[in-house]
Image (cartoon, helix red, strand yellow):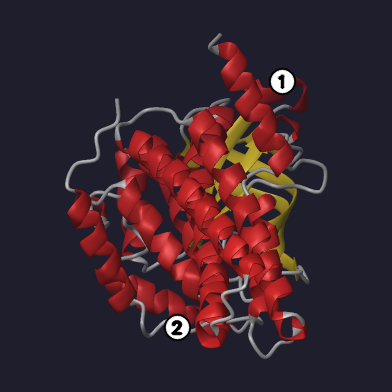
Amino acid sequence: MIKLNNYKKYLEFREEVKENLKGLKELDEYSPSLLRANLNLLREKGYLGVPYPKEYGGLGLDYLHYSIVIEEISFICPSTGLAAAAHTSLASFPIFKYGNEKQKRKYLINLAKGEKIGAMGLTEPNAGSDAAAIELLAKKNNGFYILNGTKRFITNSLEADIFVIIATIDKNLGKKGITAFIVEKDTPGFSVGKEEDKLGVRASSTCELIFEDCQIKKENLLGNEGEGYKIIMETLDGGRISIAAFSLGIAKRAYQMIVDWEKERNTKNERVYKIIAEADTLIESASLLTYYAALLKNQGERADKESANAKLYASETAVKICDYAISLYSYYGISKELNLEKFFRDAKICEIGEGTSEIMKLIIAKEVLKNI
């Protein structure tokens, strides 16, 4: 049974985060210097290592605090919110959970402090939501693993110093061959390829990763051989909570614009009131699902269904509320004057990242049926 203690402290923390993020810039197009400036602000406030222990450079706070941070960053700049979520949930978490002490000292401390930026290389041209279909091959050779293959649509590609890369040691082994590695950006044989021209979150870097006879030391094996699939599943469990929080930030920004529209015009129109009521209910519901999943994570419990519930509902809520707002503002809604169209474009990634809505529904259904 979940107990939410010290509710007031979370409210106070949110206000503190809002105050600390006043210098954060809203970005649309990719600019290395501007994105780096935003990430530096997060680093200064400790927001790139919120859920990790102080001994490893983090703030030592829980997953609900972390969700609040991602939500508030994304309210201002979704691209920066996505970069922070990928860094914290996808790169830092697997090292924290499965790395040995030497790896934590070498990599996690720098990641949690924000002195280094992280990324995870999972998606491939032929392997997206189906992690068992990974084709990037890691062959053992004289104490090294030789990696060959490519990754696509990798967030933080251009900023990252440290990558958690998912490969297979034998394609015939399926899930049992999936293995994780820590790869530094200057490793010979590893390079960042073309940048993707995306619909939304255009201010974050998303590129392909190329491995050509890339030699990885055995000491950079993360966990054990064949443990990669387990690492992915547990990492995505938490990653989906961060995407739900990311979605909430976008949804709340669009909702604020809806409320502002009525405040300025005072139409007292029944249609507008219905939009406000529905949007408010959607956000409250998405918030509860997201915070519940975060609280389960705090207690060390697996939250596969709950994180999928939160990610599915919050992501679809973000798209719906942006759509409501654009309809309300009419032509102004699709102009670049208000930036509402940008948030609408940004919202679409919510339904794709960390597993599509269809995949979330499959996870939820399987978890429900498993427990009957």
The image shows residue 205, relative to residue 108, as above or below, that is: below
Residue 193 position within the rendered picture, expressed as x and y whole percent measured from the top left = 74, 66
Sort mark 2 into few (<14), some (14-19) or many (20+) by Cα contacts within 10 Å. Answer: some
The image shows residue 238, relative to residue 115, as above or below, that is: above
Q: Please name the amino acid that badge 1 sits on.
A: Leu
- The answer to whether residue 351 is left or right of residue 85 is right
Residue 139 position within the rendered picture, expressed as x and y whole percent measured from the top left = 68, 35
- The answer to whether residue 146 is left or right of residue 283 is right
Residue at the image position 30 percent from the left and 41 percent from the top = 101
Query: Which residue has dot 2 on it?
Result: 37
Residue at the image position 52 percent from the left and 30 percent from the top = 304
Residue 26 position within the rendered picture, expressed as x and y whole percent measured from the top left = 53, 82
Which residue in the rendered view is the most extreme toward the bottom? 337
Q: How many marks?
A: 2
Camera-near label (1 vs 2) is 2
Quadrant that contains the C terminus: top right
Query: Which residue has dot 1 on it?
Result: 173
Q: Nearer the viewer, residue 215 or 124?
A: 124
